[in-house]
Image: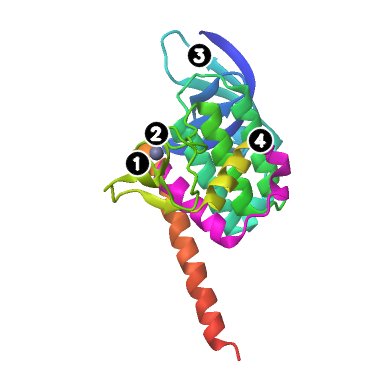
Amino acid sequence: MTGHFTTEAIVLNSIDYGESDRIVTFYTLGFGKVKGIAKGAKNSRKRFVNNLEPFSYIKLLIFQKENRELFIIEQADIMGRFDKLMFDIERLAFGSYCLELLNEMTPEGQRNLKVFELLVKFLIMLNEGANIKTVVTVFEMKLLSLLGYYPHLDACVSCKNVPISRNRIFFSSAKSGIVCYSCKGSEISLMPVSPGAIEFLTLAAKTDIEKADRISMPDWASEECENIMGDFLRYQLGKELKSKKFLNKLQAMTERQEAIGKTHSP
Ligand SMILES: [Zn+2]
């Protein structure tokens, strides 16, 4: 692939490179995930304004020389910004987590229209005030499904039976699905899960992201879903995402503040 290309893109990540350049990772409509270099972007802010910051929705003009992995970013015109995220630290933190997750899970140069569409719709929903936990769960489940990592949630991964006593099921990140009580044996690393949480995950995968707000997930279910998905994604990626670590700290801080608030209220 050589020559000039234009495509719509969302900026996933942007880092300084050398004296004056920036290396930017995009998820594009035309080519999936790509990396490009913006020459002189650090010094000449005029040329790219802030259009190469994460969350920017842009029209990109890129150039590729023969046998070069990095694209050269020639132009980036803004198509949309998700500005409200910048004024809400919780939304921003969850949004950053989803950008990092997508970046880690997708290979470079593999076009996937549905993934692009999911990302844009997710950012619109998050920016417009959708319930954070539900829209993030829908994003995670749909992304896993589109990329072929969707866990088996309808029957036990070992014996293939649909557990009869659905209140004694476990989740195995290593086996990528649920395990029934008889197959669990002495394995202690498996997480007990409630049938309700599994139903929410299944529902999240089937729901259009624009309709995420129609799912009403009680706190206990969203907590369980978050634990299962957290463990599963950590296993799949082989590490904890940086944005996830930040998110955990932020949540712990919020809980502490709420607890302090409660003890001080009459
Ligand atoms: Zn089984």
Q: Decide which of tag 4 and tag 3 comes sooner along the chain.
A: 3
Q: Quadrant of ligand 1?
A: top left
User: Distance from label 1 to label 3 (Cα)?
Assistant: 53 Å
Q: Answer above or below: position of 219 versus 19.
A: below
- At a point 71% along the width and 49% down the height, the residue shown is 213
Query: Which region is colored magenta?
Result: 207-232
* Cβ–Cβ under 8 Å for marks 1 and 2: yes
Q: Is mark 2 within 8 Å of ligand 1?
A: yes
The answer, for residue 54, to whether it is visible in the render is: no
User: Distance from label 1 to label 4 (Cα)?
Assistant: 41 Å
Give SS at disc 1.
helix
Name which quarter of the figure residue 116 lies in.
top right
Q: Which residue is mark 1?
A: 183
Q: Is mark 1 within 8 Å of ligand 1?
A: yes
User: Distance from label 1 to label 2 (Cα)?
Assistant: 7 Å
Give SS at disc 4.
helix
Q: Answer above or below: position of 143 versus 7.
A: below
Q: Which residue is mark 4?
A: 120
Say few, some or many: other residues with alpha carbon within 10 Å of mark 3 (under 14 / 14 to 19 / 20 or more).
some
